Amino acid sequence: MSTRIYSIPDNCAQYHECIVAWGYLNYLPNVAANALFVALFFIGLVAQAFLGWRHRTWGFSTALVLGIILEVVGYGGRIGLHYNVFTQTWFIMYLCCLTLAPAFFSAAVYLSLSRLLAIYGEGLCYFKGRTITLTFILCDFVSLVLQAAGGAIASTAQTHERRNMGVNIMIAGLSSQVAATTAFSLLCLHIMWNLRKNPSKINPATEDFRRGKAIRMFIWAIVIATATILARCSFRVAELSEGFKGALANDEVLYMIFEAVMMVICVFVLTVGHPGLTLGNYWNIGEFHWRQGRNREIEKQHHQTHGHAVTSEVVEAESYTPSSGDSSEHKTN
């Protein structure tokens, strides 16, 4: 027989024994700390919205903006839980939004690899940039659906059995995100290995740009963002494996380190290393059209001019420097 939970007694108040027995959390979230993260993510939201509009990086920026909005709403929910830890609405805001947000950050990272492959050379990987992007975006979507479904079930559950079912679905979604991020990291290592061992496969048309500091900044941003997402998701899997009343789920310091701080770092590096600031028009090179299934990567447009491989898009991109601010004239994804 199912046992109902959250049937809060009328005389239950926000003192320790009652919180532990009936609250959605075993503690009252710290208002100052959560307000700080609301402010930091809001700053990131404004910055990403502006950079996305300025440089027309619609796909990259839309993913980040959606993720950051979820972060702001989620930490707002945690502030609400401080004032009433028994309110389901605050718990849903906190649990669902903060669980889903990093999946959008992952999508932005996955979009970036096809651009880097187009710049460095598709021959460095067994798979085409379009194939890589579509595959990992699909994995991200599956993870997102599982986490959303699990979060909805767990946060609205009225029995232990149903809540545990929701938690298990969330764990499956988070685990799939960990697996996808790990596979993505291994693929990046494979490409880096080929860069060193097979220099003949590197695209010569972008040599001057590849020697600059801007692209290195973008690559480091992707590396750090991937590491923070992987660390965060691994922590959340361990946290949820103990349930909402487990020790990890009720350790606010650890939560703030592995959830909040990791995602602030992720948003920060993807803002400082924004492709509009670092890649400029080279972001266009790896663009592909989803409906037509037509890749516009650099190798597709190679032709020989005086014995040198060039492309029309590389010529256009080379007329741009990241500091010139002209990228808004070119539509990118």
Image (tube, rainbow, N blue to C red):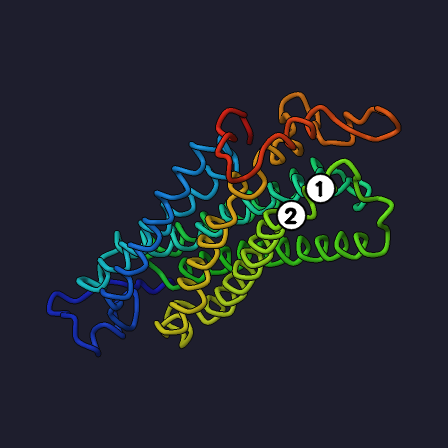
Residue 208 marker: 1
Q: How far, Cα to Cα, is label 2 from label 1?
A: 7 Å
Residue 305: image quadrant is top right
Query: Up-down: is 148 above or below 3?
Result: above
Query: In the rendered structure, which amino acid carries the disc numbered 1?
Result: Asp
Asked if residue 272 lies left or right of residue 302, the reply is left
Residue 167: image quadrant is bottom left
Dots 2, 1 in contact, CB < 8 A: yes
Where does the image place residue 123, in percent across and percent down from the top left? Answer: 82, 42
Where does the image place residue 316, in percent across and percent down from the top left? Answer: 64, 26
Q: Residue at x 84, y 30 (%)?
A: 308
Where does the image place residue 86, in percent across and percent down from the top left? Answer: 22, 62
Where does the image place residue 9, in percent across and percent down from the top left? Answer: 16, 67
Residue 26 versus residue 306: which sits nearer the camera?
Answer: 306
Q: Which residue is mark 2?
A: 212
**Residue lying farthest left?**
11
Under tag 2, what secondary structure? loop
Query: In the rendered structure, which amino acid carries the disc numbered 2?
Result: Gly
Query: Up-down: is 272 above or below 282?
Result: below
Q: Residue at x 30, y 68 (%)?
A: 25
How busy is the neighbourhood of tag 2: few (under 14 within 10 Å), some, or many (20 plus)?
A: few
Q: How many marks?
A: 2
Q: Quadrant of the N terminus?
A: bottom left
Q: Residue at x 26, y 52 (%)?
A: 89
Asked if residue 26 lies left or right of residue 176, the reply is left
Residue 114 versus residue 246: which sits nearer the camera?
Answer: 114
Residue 10 marker: none
Under tag 1, what secondary structure? helix
Residue 201: image quadrant is top right
Q: Quadrant of the C terminus?
A: top right
